[in-house]
Amino acid sequence: MRRLLIFALAIVPSVASAQVAVRNTETARAASVTSLTLPTLNVVSGDVVGLCLAFSQSAGAPTFNPATGVTFNGSAVTAVQIQDVNGITNRAGGFYYFVASATANADVVITLSGSSGEVQGGALSLSGVNTSSVVRSSTDTTSNTTSISATVSATNANDMMGDCYVKNGGNNEGTAGANQTQYSAQHSGSPQLTQRASYKAGSFGSATMSWTIPSGGANVWMAAASFQAAASAVSSTRRLLLGCCR
C-alpha cells in the first residue's frame, strides 16, 4: 500500500492600515462677527480636517450650515456634521469635518447666517484617514457635574480619536482626560462661552474621551469620534497545506 503526500503553498493576501497622524492644528476666536478665520492650516490634498465650533445665539440666531458655511484656500468646501451641539441654552456649533482637495497652507473660514456675540473654533488636519468612510463611530453627551465623558463604541488602534467640548458658564475650565492632547482652548467671559478640543490615538474596541470641570454645575456638551484609518499596503501570508491520499 502506498501513501502519497500532497503539499500546496497558498498565498493569502491581507490588507493593513497605517496610523492616522496629526499634521497641523489651528485655533481662533472672535467677538461680534459673522465669520471666523482659522489661519494658515497646513493641509495636503486628501487630508481630513476636523472642525470644533462653538458660538453664542440669541433666540436661535445666528445659525451655521456646514454644507455651505466653510471655505478653505478661498474655495467652498462641503463640511459634514459629525455631531451638533444640543441641550446647551443659547449656545450652538458642533463637530464637523471636510476632505481637502488641495494642498496648501491656507485659511479655513467659517461663516454664520448672522452676527454672533462670540465665535470659537479649532481645526485639526489628519493624514491617513479613509476618505470614503471617514468616521468609524461617533457619539455626544451633556453634563451638569464636575466631569463629562463620551465613549465611542467602535474604534481601531490605527484610528485617531477627536473630540469637541462646549461649555456655557463663566469659568475658563476643562481639563483633558488621560492620553488626550489638547489643541484648542478658547474662552469668553461675556457672553460666557468656553470651547476645548483634543485628540488621542485609537484603541481596539471602544474608546473614551473625557474632561474634568473643577467648579461643577456646568452646562457642558461634548462629542467624540473615531477617524478611520485608510487601508495601506497589501501583505501576503503564506500557508502550507498538507493533503494525503492512498
Image: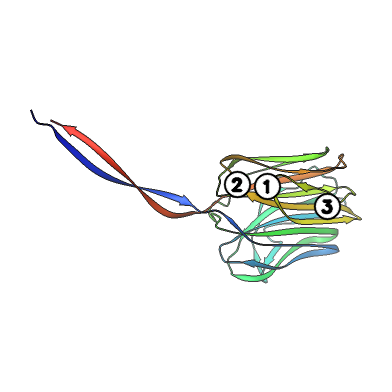
Q: Secondary structure at mark 2?
A: loop
Q: Amino acid at mark 3?
A: Thr
Q: Badge 1: few (under 14), some or many (20 or more) residues near its Cα, within 10 Å? A: few
Looking at the rendered image, the quarter that the C terminus falls into is top left
Residue 33, image x and y in percent? Answer: 84, 64
100 shown above or below 88: below
Q: Are marks 1 and 3 in contact (CB under 8 Å)?
A: no
Q: Earlier in the sequence, mark 3 or mark 2?
A: 3
Q: From where the camera sits, is residue 62 visible?
A: no
Numbered badge on residue 194: 3
**Label 1 element class:** loop
Going from N to C along the chain, the mark reached first, 1 or 3, is 1
Horizontally, residue 101 falls left or right of residue 27, namely left
Label 3 and label 2: CA atoms lie apart by: 26 Å
Give the left or right position of residue 164, taking residue 45 as reference: right
Q: Which residue is mark 1?
A: 179
Quadrant, the N terminus? top left
> Disc number at residue 202?
2
Answer few, some or many: residues within 10 Å of disc 2's Cα (few below 14, many 20 plus, some between 14 and 19): many
Q: In this orientation, which residue lies closer to the viewer: 77 or 180?
A: 180
Of the pair 34 and 118, the residue shown nearer to us: 118
> Which residue shows up at 79% across the image and 54% down it?
54
Q: Amino acid at mark 1?
A: Asn
- Distance CA(mark 1)–CA(mark 2): 10 Å
* Mark whose residue sits in front, 1 or 3: 1
